[in-house]
Image: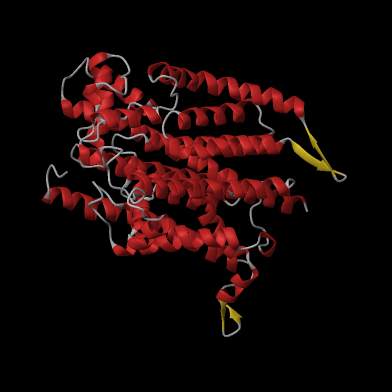
Amino acid sequence: MWYNMRKDIILREITMKQNRKLSIATAVCYFGLYIVIALSLLIRQPFGSPPDENNRYLVPQYIVEHGTLPNGYDEEIRIGGYGFSYAFQPILPYIFQGYAMRLVNLFTDSEEALLYTARSVNFLFGLVMAVFVMLLGRKWFEDRRFAWLFAFLVTFLPQAIFMHTYVNTDSCCMMATAIMLYGLTCGLKDGFKWSSSTVMAVGIIFCAMSYYNAYGYILSCMLLFVAFYLTRADGKISFDWKPFLKWGCFISVLVLAGIGWWFVRSAILYDGDFLGLQARENCAALYAVPEQHPDTRLTWQNQGYSVWDMLRETTFFELSRMSFIGIFGAMSIPMSPWVYRFYRVLLFGCAVLGILIPLKKCKGATKLLPRRKGLEVFFRLNMVFCILMPLILSIQYSYTRDYQPQGRYLLPSLVPLGYYSVRGLEKFFRANFWECFLLIKGKMILPAGRRKEWLETGVVVALCLLIAVCIIVSVYGYVYPYYAENPGAL
């Protein structure tokens, strides 16, 4: 008996060492692939080829030249024709880029070096996001195979990695959503202790200071934070005020310290308009050419069409879906049709399964909060809200301002969408009807004891490899040849 126990312990230790080595190898491939692909795109793209980079770059350039933050009305940063600038809304990524460029400018005046410096800030945002997406996968999926699939799916979506390679605020926003959700998830598990509360607050700061489209996440964090302290016992609902006030005040102080200065500054500069939205419209009204003037610009709305007319008569959903998956350059470099088909099934098809398949039909599926069923349901509803909110805002932009539908407006929804996609695949594996796929003429394909595990592992590994192949082929098979044939393309 002693010999058998000792043997079992040794076998477990060997298995743990093997799993640790496999996990390290996977992490090396994961981060290595991100670094190689992102740097390849960062260096290869001509200035201004990514969407609106030349106009966004005006803000960090101003910081380099003057050492201060610009007023949105400053002529140096106004966009020709449109009459407004990107300095009216939160510009934290541009601040990082501007002062990093200012540091590099002490050693060189090379315009190329300064541009790569600004782009490298977003590259680092993407790397931080990759770390938190990996950590988040481990919190959301007990099975490490699905955790890695989630990390690969979110990090290597072609459009997502593209956003981390040029000057924009979307990259910081995407990083912020991953940080927020990681802090929120840890807080729901540990009761919002110092570490999880701090992480969530940092995520909220980066979100609030980068992109209004993702503010739905801030609302969701607030709602779930409040819901966490609601408990029901013996048919009565109670609220735990003491920890709510303690951690709520702690998070609020951190967030206000991080973002308050910007909104106070905006209120002072723009006559109380702390969001800068109306000031931006006023600036456009003063300096825009007639075709782009807010009062005369042709939009679906001021031409008397309905939202339904716009959606029916345009390729809004098709173009949004394709560019969400990935269209490089200035919406000018599409990928292989097979890449779009692959992601349409994996990202959107599996997400539908993740939302619709009942959890009770799935034995062994991951439960985020097994002891708080109501809170877990509310969490998932909030994730659906975070998916839908960017889509609603994108429709509004196209309808009221005639913005071209672009997938980058929808990218704040990527992390929860990736969650539901992998969750859908996990539920499919755990559902009872999965076994029918393992039968040939009434017999199991594999030995009964390991049949599911082997097939699940094979499918997950194959999907991770396909994701890697998609991004490699897209960059080196489509982006590189395009710029080789069109050097300096805009």
Dividing the picture into quadrants, the one containing residue 54 is: top left
Q: Residue at x 26, y 56 (%)?
A: 334
Residue 487 on image: x %, y % = 11, 45
Figure check: 46 above or below 433: above
Residue 21 in view in this figure: yes
In the image, 342 versus 391, the foreground residue is 391
Number of numbered discs: 0
Q: Residue at x 45, y 57 (%)?
A: 347
Q: Residue at x 49, y 59 (%)?
A: 460
In the image, 151 versus 85, the foreground residue is 85
Assign the C terminus to one quadrant of the image: top left
Residue 468 on image: x %, y % = 36, 53
Query: Residue farthest to the bottom?
Result: 441
Figure check: 449 above or below 142: below
Q: Residue at x 23, y 32 (%)?
A: 79
In the image, 352 versus 118, the foreground residue is 352
Residue 110 on image: x %, y % = 15, 24
Residue 351 on image: x %, y % = 51, 58
Figure check: 49 above or below 458: above
* Left or right relative to 76: residue 17: right
Dividing the picture into quadrants, the one containing residue 33 is: top left
Query: Residue farthest to the right?
Result: 234
Assign the N terminus to one quadrant of the image: bottom right
Residue 89 in view in this figure: no
* Left or right relative to 485: residue 62: right
